[in-house]
């Protein structure tokens, strides 16, 4: 494109033969929602728009129309992109070669859970996109309306519990504050909460490309371990809210309660030359709170402990395959010689 042109202007096309002045075609190749590092919602879209009126209406714009509110919410100049494929398909449309676009538009955070449509425009107004114009309305965007989250894991050093995961939803529109809450099912109320500093999760953004906050949906928070964590049924809640203190108008995701099931098996015991070799597995999600694993030899005849040793656990996909309800079952095997 001639660099002397405005950045949203297509060149005058004098090469197209038998231009169809009434032609107005377009296609939306891809789109996604995201947000920048400041939490500003953004719509990214690519595609093309070709019209036979482009020699008279040479300035290009992209408009975001909020179907829920019934009016435009964002407008931006479009930099024309070369699309040789479109020119081959529509050789009788002026400037079909320069019909492409790839645009990133800031949109109000409060609108990301609304029905949105994109409008591609050619206009004779270089500054505002009004005046004589040709619009192409793309179909309403199919945006994710769900509430998705996952608890990646719990880990403890015996004093503090680290909770990691992600929570992505467009229902968080207008709710910029993120909290993780520890809920005690036995007591029927919250026992602690931690405010989240956003963790970048490009993997979640790839999986949920039309959820604005997916890219910043990660969390990693620490709780001080109190007796309730060990004795009661604890459930974690991820909350997006409009209240800086973590209350107010919120959208919550309740993770499954911590599984207190305790399963184990002693696969073999071998006594030889004054040594006892034991092999087996012990799986319980309480190991996420109590990370130190010990094997103890107990003398039932004397009623006394005769040996104990801290023993690291090993991978155990076979146990996980059978007891998938235990988060830590895939790392529960032991094999040790006393």
Image: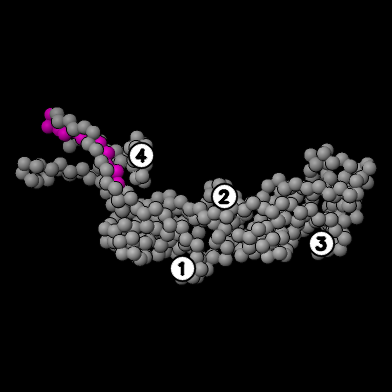
Any magenta on residue 164?
A: no
| In-image side of 139 versus 321 (left or right) | right
User: Tag on residue 246?
Assistant: 1
**Disc 4 secondary structure class:** helix
| Alpha-carbon span between mark 2 and mark 4 | 28 Å
Labels 1 and 2 touching (C-beta < 8 A)? no
For the point 14% across and 29% down, which residue is it? 272
**Disc 2 secondary structure class:** loop
Residue carrying label 3: 129
Circle nearer the N terminus (2, 4): 2
User: Tag on residue 113?
Assistant: none
The image shows residue 23, relative to residue 64, as above or below, that is: above
User: Tag on residue 320?
Assistant: 4
| Alpha-carbon span between mark 1 and mark 4 | 36 Å
Circle nearer the N terminus (3, 4): 3
For the point 69% across and 61% down, which residue is it? 66
| Alpha-carbon span between mark 3 and mark 4 | 60 Å
For the point 61% across and 63% down, which residue is it? 109
Within 10 Å of the Cα at label 2, are there few (<14), some (14-19), or many (20+) other Cα atoms?
many
- Pinpoint residue 96: horizontal percent, then vertical percent: 84, 45
Residue carrying label 2: 208
Circle nearer the N terminus (1, 2): 2
Labels 1 and 4 touching (C-beta < 8 A)? no
Q: Which region of the structure is painted magenta?
A: 273-284
Within 10 Å of the Cα at label 1, are there few (<14), some (14-19), or many (20+) other Cα atoms?
many
């Amino acid at each position: 494109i001639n660099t002397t042109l405005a950045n949203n202007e297509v060149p005058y096309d004098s090469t197209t033969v038998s231009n169809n002045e009434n032609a107005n075609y377009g296609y939306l190749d891809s789109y996604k929602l995201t947000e920048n590092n400041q939490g500003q919602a953004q719509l990214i879209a690519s595609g093309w728009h070709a019209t036979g009126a482009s020699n008279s209406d040479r300035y290009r714009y992209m408009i975001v129309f909020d179907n829920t509110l019934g009016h435009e919410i964002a407008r931006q100049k479009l930099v024309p992109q070369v699309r040789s494929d479109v020119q081959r398909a529509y050789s009788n449309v002026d400037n079909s070669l320069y019909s492409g676009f790839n645009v990133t538009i800031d949109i109000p955070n409060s609108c990301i859970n609304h029905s949105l449509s994109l409008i591609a425009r050619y206009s004779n107004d270089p500054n505002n996109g009004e005046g004589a114009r040709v619009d192409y309305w793309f179909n309403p965007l199919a945006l994710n309306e769900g509430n998705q989250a996952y608890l990646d894991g719990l880990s403890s050093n015996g004093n503090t519990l680290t909770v990691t995961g992600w929570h992505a939803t467009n229902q968080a529109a207008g709710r910029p504050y993120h909290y993780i809450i520890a809920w005690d099912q036995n007591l029927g109320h919250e026992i602690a909460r931690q405010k989240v500093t956003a963790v970048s999760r490009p993997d979640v953004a790839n999986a949920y490309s039309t959820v604005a906050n997916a890219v910043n949906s990660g969390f990693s928070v620490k709780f001080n371990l109190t007796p309730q964590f060990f004795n009661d049924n604890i459930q974690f809640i991820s909350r997006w809210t409009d209240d800086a203190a973590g209350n107010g108008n919120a959208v919550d995701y309740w993770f499954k309660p911590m599984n207190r099931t305790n399963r184990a098996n002693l696969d073999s015991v071998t006594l030889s030359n004054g040594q006892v070799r034991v092999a087996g597995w012990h799986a319980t999600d309480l190991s996420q709170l109590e990370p130190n694993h010990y094997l103890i030899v107990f003398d039932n005849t004397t009623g006394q402990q005769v040996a104990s040793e801290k023993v690291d656990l090993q991978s155990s996909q076979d146990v996980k395959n059978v007891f998938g309800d235990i988060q830590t079952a895939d790392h529960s095997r032991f094999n040790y010689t006393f």
